[in-house]
Image (spheres, helix red, strand yellow):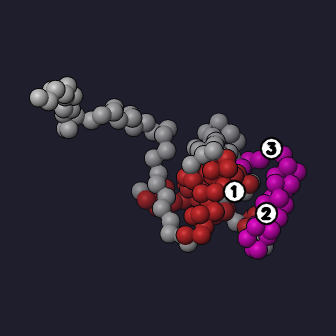
Amino acid sequence: MKDSKATKPKRDRKKPTRAKAPVVDEIREGRLMMRVHADLVHMLDIRAKERGESRSRYIEKLLVAFLRADPRNPKIDAVGRIDAEAPAPLKAPDPLRFGERWARWVDINDKLLGFRVPDEWLDDEWGYFEWAKRAVDNDEK
C-alpha cells in the first residue's frame, strides 16, 4: 500500500506572489530600446559582468557619463535626474572652468567619435539644455 504523500496546499494563481513596487516620480520611468548588432550586445554583457552590474545599468552609466561631459547640459545625478539646485550652465559662475570643460568635451568627441565639435555650438542657444527645453515646452502648449 502506498503511503499518502503530504500535499502542499495549492496557491491562488490570481493572487500576485510579490507586491508591486509603488510608482514614484523619482524612479526611472523612461524606457530606451535600441536595435544593435549581437557582437555589441556580447561586448556590453562582458563589460557589465566585469563590473558586477546589469547591462542596462552599465549602458545607463555610459550615457550619464557622456552627457555629464557636455558643459552645456545641466548637472545630473547617477541615474540622469537633473539637479534643480545646481546653477544653469548658461549662468556658469566661472567662465575659465566652463572653457576647460568645453575643450575636454571637444576632445572627447574627437577621440571617441571622430567628430570635431564646431565652435558655433558654443554660441548656439539651441545647444543649451534649459533654453532648448523651454522652447520645446512652449511649442507644446
| Residue identified by numbered label 2 | 108
Task: Residue 30: give x, y in percent of width and height.
Answer: 47, 51
- In this view, the residue in front, 75 or 125, is 75
Q: Specify the quadrant of the image occupied by residue 128.
A: bottom right
Mark 1–mark 3 contact, CB under 8 Å? no
The reply to whether the magenta stretch includes residue 99 is yes
Q: Dot 3 surroundings within 10 Å: few (below 14), some, or many (20 or more)?
A: few
Q: Dot 2 surroundings within 10 Å: few (below 14), some, or many (20 or more)?
A: some
The magenta segment is 89-115
At mark 1, the secondary structure is helix
Mark 2–mark 1 contact, CB under 8 Å? yes
Residue type, label 1: Phe
Task: Residue 60: give x, y in percent of width and height.
Answer: 59, 52
Q: Residue at x 85, y 49 (%)?
A: 97
| Residue identified by numbered label 3 | 93
Q: Nearer the viewer, mark 3 or mark 2?
A: 2
Residue type, label 3: Pro
Task: Mark 3 or mark 2: name the one nearer the start of the chain.
Answer: 3
Identify the image quadrant of the C terminus.
bottom left
At mark 2, the secondary structure is helix
| Residue identified by numbered label 1 | 66
Viewed as shown, does residue 140 lie left or right of 81?
left
